[in-house]
């Protein structure tokens, strides 16, 4: 298990730049996740802040270093 974010503010900033601008982001109209990474991060935020090693790797986290752009980011059209 890994904790990719130092604090809630870092999590919030990262999600706003990545998940909220990603074509795979949360579908507010349907009320469902389109991205299992965002779901895992949201659930971790409400718990201990830890995600599985797989999720950490997939978002671009390496021990002590979080890439600012999610490794699976897909730009929204428009």
Image (cartoon, helix red, strand yellow):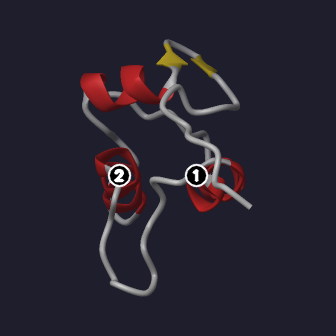
Q: Quadrant of the C terminus?
A: bottom right
The reply to whether the C-beta atoms of the residues labelled 1 and 2 are less than 8 Å apart is yes
Q: Estimate the x, y position of residue 46 in percent, counting from the top left.
A: 37, 66
Q: Is residue 49 above or below residue 1?
A: below
Q: Is residue 73 above or below residue 16?
A: above
Q: Estimate the x, y position of residue 55 in percent, counting from the top left.
A: 32, 32
- Mark 2 packing: few (<14 Cα in 10 Å), some, or many (20+)? some
The number of callouts visible is: 2
Q: Which residue, given by chain and number where applicable, does mark 1 sit on? A: 22
**Does residue 78 appear to the left or right of 72 in the view shown?**
right
Q: Earlier in the sequence, mark 1 or mark 2?
A: 1
Q: Which residue, given by chain and number where applicable, does mark 2 sit on? A: 35
- Mark 1 packing: few (<14 Cα in 10 Å), some, or many (20+)? some
Relative depth, front residue between 32 and 64 = 32
Can you tell which mark lies on residue 31? none
Query: Which quadrant of the figure has residue 3?
Result: top left
Q: Is residue 49 above or below residue 31?
A: above
Relative depth, front residue between 75 and 62 = 75
Q: Residue at x 47, y 30 (%)?
A: 59
Q: Is residue 61 above or below residue 4?
A: above
Q: Estimate the x, y position of residue 24 in percent, counting from the top left.
A: 45, 53
Indicate the secondary structure of the residue bearing disc 1: loop
Relative depth, front residue between 67 and 10 = 67
Q: Quadrant of the N terminus?
A: top left
Q: Estimate the x, y position of residue 64 in percent, counting from the top left.
A: 58, 16
Q: Residue at x 58, y 52 (%)?
A: 22
Q: Is residue 1 visible?
A: no
Q: Residue at x 29, y 49 (%)?
A: 36
**Does residue 71 appear to the left or right of 49 in the view shown?**
right
Q: Is residue 9 visible?
A: yes
């Amino acid at each position: 298990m890994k904790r990719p974010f130092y604090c809630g503010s870092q999590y919030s900033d990262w999600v706003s730049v990545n998940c909220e601008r990603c074509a795979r982001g949360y579908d507010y109209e349907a009320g469902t996740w389109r991205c299992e990474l965002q779901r895992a991060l949201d659930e971790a935020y409400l718990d201990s802040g830890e995600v599985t090693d797989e999720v950490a790797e997939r978002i671009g986290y390496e021990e002590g270093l979080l890439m600012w752009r999610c490794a699976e980011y897909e730009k929204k059209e428009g």
